[in-house]
Image: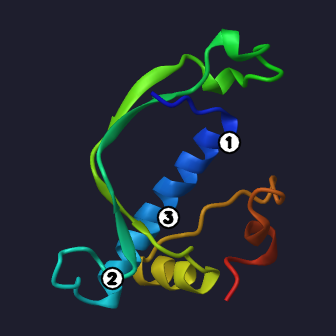
Amino acid sequence: MKKLGVMGFLSLGLICLVLFCGTSLAGMAGAAPSNGTPEDMVLIPAGKFLMGSSPKDGRVGFTVGVDELPQHPVELTAYYLDRYEVTAKQYRKFIETMGRKPPGDPRFPEIYPWAREGGVPK
């Protein structure tokens, strides 16, 4: 079983975001190829891994984030992931088509710069 630290956890979150946006964008793009895999996507097989950290991985609050505890097993079903990153233009099309508001909080411009700048870039 593989352990995930802070970067692994953030990467998993990014994968989920790309998966969510990518799946929705793929559905807007057209039909899947004859093998059943949506165009420009890859099948990630089902599997298990250890998410988080244990106190023996470092000093809690310093080298191990408190949000990484407790370490626990996670089992994911198979899913599709975009082969390429979602662009700001694709994301804007998705949120406009779906009638959603972009995530953001103007109090944290370093995380959501578009919240300060009037929306997701065109």
Most foreground residue, 71 or 47: 47
Q: Which residue appears at 76% of the width and 56% of the height? A: 111
Residue 107 position, x and y percent, is 81, 53
Left/right of residue 64 with respect to residue 30 in the rendered view: right
Q: Give the residue type at disc 3.
A: Val
Which mark is on residue 18?
A: 3
Most foreground residue, 16 or 36: 36
Which mark is on residue 33?
A: none
Q: Which residue is mark 1?
A: 7
- Verify CB contact (< 8 Å) between mark 2 and mark 1: no
Measure the alpha-carbon separation of dots 3 and 1: 16 Å
| Residue count near mark 1 (Cα–Cα under 10 Å), binned few <14, some 14–19, many ≥20 | few
Count up the numbered dots.
3
**Label 2 element class:** loop
**Which comes sooner in the sequence, label 2 or label 1?**
1
Residue 75 position, x and y percent, is 33, 34
Q: Which residue appears at 72% of the width and 57% of the height? A: 105
Q: Which residue appears at 61% of the width and 21% of the height? A: 53
